[in-house]
Amino acid sequence: MNPSEIAETKNYAKNRPSDFSWYEKPEWNDNNIVLYHYQTRDSGLIEESNGQYIEKQFKQYNDDTVQFQDFNHWTCGWIKAIAVKIHNDENEFTEAFLTLCDIFEKLDDYPLLDEDDYSTREWESVQRSIKEAVSFWARNHDELTEVDEDKIGYIISQDCEISEDYYPSDEEIEEAYQEFLNK
């Protein structure tokens, strides 16, 4: 990042909602903190994947430049955030702050920080949806065993849309069931 982008990041760090209450705030100067919210209760797979990447990147800092924060509220659930100290005692940028700047730069170019992790999460989400849908559909087919359901799910997974929002229709399940019967 160039110096103006780093300055922009510092200014971003100083903007907080006027009604924000922070009980476990680090004992750093207010102008020396970036509080970055990276995951919420309602996060999708992208935020979950990026959140895991961010946590891995910052767990390496065993000094006083990083604090993981968890916020809870009865109406909006929970929020995970990271507080990063901007300057050290010599008024130089901390390594943690430069790491956060690198993450911001990566996110400006592409929304995924770890594409392999995201792809794995997406595939697992599809598999859970298929298993749930087939299990629900199979309630009307007492003759099917759990192994049969898994085989029908496998047939569906061979030609389905890979998306975190995918859920097989009854028609797709019925087609897979007919294919299963014909094998």
Image: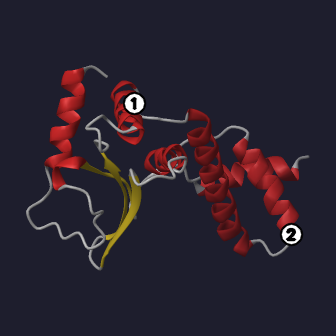
Residue type at the position of mark 1:
Asp
Q: Residue at x 30, y 62 (%)?
A: 26
Q: Nearer the viewer, mark 2 or mark 1?
A: 1
Secondary structure beneath dot 2 equals loop
Residue under label 1, please give it: 102
Residue 116 location, x and y as percent? 62, 35
On residue 145, the disc is 2
Residue 144: in sight, yes or no? no
Depth check, front residue: 109 or 57:
57
Q: Residue at x 18, y 32 (%)?
A: 8
Q: Pick out the residue farthest to the left.
A: 18
Depth check, front residue: 66 or 121:
66
Q: Pick out the residue farthest to the bottom.
A: 74
Depth check, front residue: 107 or 158:
107
Residue 100 location, x and y as percent? 37, 38
Q: Pick out the residue farthest to the top.
A: 2
Q: Residue at x 48, y 51 (%)?
A: 48
Closer to the N terminus: mark 2 or mark 1?
1
Mark 1 crowd level (few <14, some 14–19, many ≥20, 10 Å Cα): some
Residue type at the position of mark 2:
Thr
Residue 176 location, x and y as percent? 74, 49
Q: Give the answer, above or below, for where 91 lies relative to 169.
A: above
- The part of the image, by quadrant, that contains residue 90 is top left
Residue 25 location, x and y as percent? 28, 66
Q: Residue at x 36, y 39 (%)?
A: 94
Mark 2 crowd level (few <14, some 14–19, many ≥20, 10 Å Cα): few
Q: In the rendered structure, are the residues bearing label 2 and label 1 in contact, judged by CB atoms less than 8 Å apart?
A: no
